[in-house]
Amino acid sequence: MVKINEIINFKDHPIDNFDYINKCKYKISHESVLVLENFLTDECLNELIAEALKLQDKAFYCSQNHTIFLDKYDKNIGDKDPLNIEVKSDKGCVPHDYLDAKSKLNILYDSQIFKNFLKEILNLNNLFPYADSLSSINYNYYQNKQQLGWHFDNASFAITLMIQASDTGGEFQYVNKGRNYNKSYIDKNYIKKILDNSINPKTIKSKPGTLILFYGRNYLHRVTPVTSKKPRILVTLNYNEEEGTLLSENARLTFFGRIN
Ligand SMILES: O=C(O)CCC(=O)C(=O)O
Ligand SMILES: [Fe+2]
């Protein structure tokens, strides 16, 4: 059986250590994101790169325009309202059911040590997989010219694992102001400035093996267009606080091209 220390680089990231957990908690609460470089062992990263390349031709590519809330443009509102401005997203996605049961991603995703770490850092009571067979773990492929437009996630937090960086472009950008979901607060002027490119967002250029945690429902974020032949490949590890959650059929059709 594969042990979790064959997957996670415990030397740099002792995720079951009290002091390390507190350091991570401090970071995410002060900087809004937590970036853990070299999170995976070299052996695991190499295996995941091979798996990602093997599954690449199974990716479903979607191209869509959407608002920052991932909604459709509402012609009754018009484009003066920043919440109704359209941006473009196109990327490929491999759903969970294409992964081998023995994939190290499944072992990491189900690992109690890893889930306890996430619960501590993100102050969550529970973490459950999606109840559908597609949405829990996804490989995402951003080919040349592909991007993810500015958006807020529907889920409160996001966990990503970089597998392969593009040579150029494909940068993760975010701002940590503009919305407080729990307080129903949204700053339209600030959002307009982001969409106009008149505010410089923060940029993270992550290397393969980097784990990123961020509050995607409160912080507007995007991935800039890839400008190299080499695609950007990234895994999203998607959990829910409630047991039995399904990704909506509409979202499954959009991102995976099928419902089950
Ligand atoms: O690809 C990334 O780095 C971010 C992905 C993301 O924001 C999303 O899937 O909602
Ligand atoms: Fe997102």
Image (cartoon, rainbow, N blue to C red):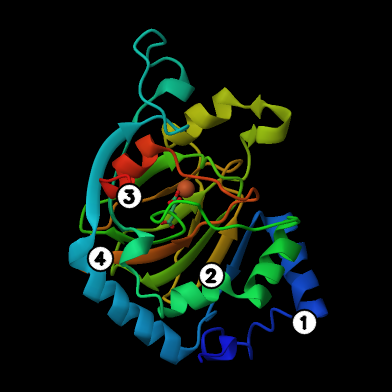
Of labels 2 and 4, the one closer to you:
2
Secondary structure of the residue carrying numbered label 4 = loop
Left or right for 177, reference 38: right
Secondary structure of the residue carrying numbered label 1 = loop
Q: Residue at x 51, y 90 (%)?
A: 2
CB atoms at circles 2 and 4 under 8 Å apart?
Answer: no
Q: CA distance from mark 3 to mark 2?
A: 20 Å
Secondary structure of the residue carrying numbered label 2 = helix
Q: Quadrant of residue 217?
A: top right
Circle 2 sits on which residue?
109
Mark 4 CB near ligand 1 (8 Å cut): no
Above or below residue 32? Residue 18 is below
Q: Quadrant of residue 73?
A: top left
Which amino acid, mark 3?
Asn
Circle 1 sits on which residue?
17
For residue 209, say whether it is visible. Answer: no
- Sooner in the amino-acid sequence: mark 3 or mark 4: 4
Q: CA distance from mark 2 to mark 4?
A: 24 Å
Of labels 1 and 2, the one closer to you:
2
The extreme top residue here reads: 76
CB atoms at circles 3 and 2 under 8 Å apart?
Answer: no
Question: Which mark, residue 260?
Answer: 3
Which amino acid, mark 1?
Asn
Above or below residue 90? Residue 183 is above
